[in-house]
Amino acid sequence: MNNLITNQPKIYEGNRLNFYNDCFPILKKLFDENDLKLAEKIQLHSSHGYDDRGYAIGLCHPSRYSSDNQTRHITISPSLNGETVDNTIKALGTMAHELVHTIDNCNNHGNLFKTNAEKIGLRGKPTCIGAILEGDNASVEFNDFIVTNVINTIGCLPEQALLKLKSGKGSRTKKIICNKCGYRNSATGQKVIEWSQRGGFACNDCGEYHDDYDVYFDGASQPATDLFEVQFNYCD
Ligand SMILES: [Zn+2]
Ligand SMILES: [Zn+2]
């Protein structure tokens, strides 16, 4: 019965970085069991502002970027959602992916990378290989490992996603669907925050001033957010 997940899983008490640091020795066990040797020095980070492209959910920086030329710095984006079993498995799939890059200084997604990632149960295309929850290609063994060794012991990844808005020059416009008339409004991220703080705006089609909009920040890949929530969920 140890693996039984209740509807209300325990949430880790502490911040995200502490969570990832506590997960490190647990994940390392999985690598050890598969005779995979991680880099000696690894430092984890959970922060925005490291990714010029603005969308990577994890990065493993080559050791030459560290002051001692040895440490592998790994950044895991806070845009990953926490607080549920599924979210936790996916986030740790990202962390495990980045850890695979530290084996034999493997900074690409070639055959060695793919083979090592699959040994610990990650699945998917090499560039985004990680934890897959459902379907024929699900990373069942990895997922079970996380449930047993992380979620049932220290709990789920804390905190909801903190997405990064790109605003100003070069920012993409955001899709904002009016739930009164269905019209697709658009505006920069900065504008959307403003409207959220103000409590609404007038739809460009039906003209009604209200706050019943669905905001899409990252195309179709991310679920919509209520306009009202934008000011709390997103940082600039
Ligand atoms: Zn990678
Ligand atoms: Zn409208």
Image (cartoon, rainbow, N blue to C red):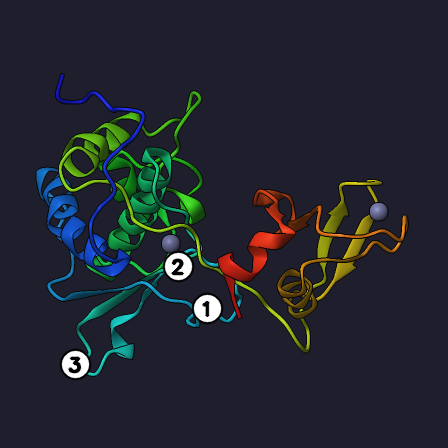
Residue located farthest toward the top when viewing the structure as drawn:
1
141 is higher (above) or lower (below) than 184? above
Distance of label 1 from label 2 (alpha carbons) = 9 Å
Residue denoted by label 2: 77
Q: Is residue 135 left or right of residue 12?
A: right
Tag 1 and tag 2, C-beta contact below 8 Å: yes
Q: In the image shown, does 180 or 48 lie closer to the viewer? A: 180
Q: Amino acid at mark 2?
A: Ser
Q: In the image shown, does 107 or 133 lie closer to the viewer? A: 133
Confirm or reject: label 2 Cβ below 8 Å from ligand 1: no
Q: What x and y, as percent, mark residue 147?
A: 22, 31
Q: In the image shown, does 1 or 233 lie closer to the viewer? A: 233
Residue denoted by label 3: 68
Q: Amino acid at mark 1?
A: Asp
Q: Is residue 24 left or right of residue 134?
A: left
- Between disc 1 and disc 2, the foreground one is 2
Q: Amino acid at mark 3?
A: Asp
Q: Is residue 200 left or right of residue 208?
A: left
Q: What x and y, as percent, mark residue 146?
A: 22, 35
Residue denoted by label 1: 51
